[in-house]
Amino acid sequence: MKILVPLKRVADPDNANKVKIAADGSKVDTAGLEWKPNPFDEYALEAALRLTEDGKAQKKRLGEIVVVTFGPKDTEVTLRAALATGADRAIRIETDDDDLDGLVVAKALKTLIEEEKPDVVVLGKQAVDADTNQVGQILSELLDWPVASFAAGIQEEDGGWLVAREVDGGVINVRVKYPCLVAVDLRVVTPTACYSLKTDKGFKYHEGVRFAPLPAIMQARRTPLATKKLADLASDTPKIQYLRYEEPPVRAAGITVADVDELVDKLTNEAKVL
């Protein structure tokens, strides 16, 4: 089985207080921000690793995982981290962040997928910076592939996957046949969420994503990466334009009320929510 996993670097959401906006509101100043892989994409990579191995013999890869990212050269850190974790090959699409939106990324991925011919594309349900949740659905439409989004669990079957999708009020199980696309949610990395046919169902993974051992990290630093130009994969320009950025208004401090009557009065006459 061959799985392609798109990865995106994002500003560390734990350091959101460091985000600054240019004085004219034209852009977000990323200087000083720390970059890390989009968490949902990390979950996608972990799912791909579990589905191409026997859980009891994780050092032996039973399929191929190709990771891809879009951006300048410094995004290669994200790819090398994925290689150290267990991915087999990595591709960087040379571009600037300002040249991308969900549609451009999906069209470029479509071209790349037609070249690579993976059985499955596994990606995060969304990126935590823009939170648009677009690429998976657009890409499935462009490829005319079945898609299972918000995947909380994946079980490999002959010729396809049984995917547990999170929906309002619970979980729905759907079957997708190869080739297909799966967009994962955070519960996909719980101990019993993902199993290949080779992994015994009594086996339990550790919670969350795995960490790369030091020898693998050192080897990944020397591994050659493939590079492609965005213009060779998609010629479109972004359809989405950000006109202005501004910080949210400062919230007023809370107050203490004496009793329920005063609370109801303020909710009715000041907050006007009743």
Image: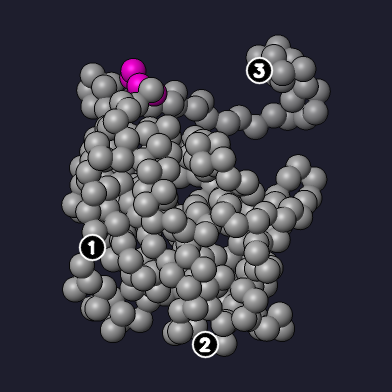
Q: Secondary structure at mark 3?
A: loop
Looking at the picture, which amino acid does disc 1 mark?
A: Leu
- Residue 208 spot, x, y in % from top left: 54, 68
Please name the residue shown 26% across and 73% down the image.
220
Please name which of the two marks, 2 or 3, marks the residue nearer to the observer: 2
Q: Amino acid at mark 3?
A: Ala
The residue most toward the bottom is 57
Q: Earlier in the sequence, mark 1 or mark 2?
A: 2
Mark yes or no: residue 185 visible: no
Residue 250 position (above or below residue 156): above
Magenta span contains residue 130? no
- Residue 224 occupies quadrant: bottom left
The residue carrying pointer 1 sits among few (fewer than 14), some (14 to 19) or many (20 or more) residues within 10 Å by Cα, namely some
Residue 271 - label:
3
Q: Is disc 2 placed on a helix, strand or loop?
A: loop
In the image, residue 242 lies in the stretch drawn in magenta: yes
* Residue 196 visible from this viewpoint: yes
Please tell me which residue lies in front, 193 or 61.
61
- Residue closer to the observer: 90 or 133: 90
| Range covered by the magenta-colored residues | 240-244
Q: Amino acid at mark 2?
A: Ala
Look at mark 2 in the image and give the residue it sits on.
57
Task: Count residues near mark 2 (Cα–Cα under 10 Å), then give few for <14, some for 14-19, many for 20+.
Answer: few
* For residue 191, above or below residue 167: below
Report how far apart the C-alphas of labels 2 and 3 lie in the structure. 59 Å
- Do the numbered discs 2 and 3 sit on residues whose CB atoms are within 8 Å? no
Q: Position of residue 262 (x, y in %)?
A: 75, 22
Which residue is at 69% across, 14% downward?
272
Who's the residue at 49% across and 78% down the image? 62
| Distance CA(mark 1)–CA(mark 2) | 26 Å
Q: Which mark is residue 225?
A: 1
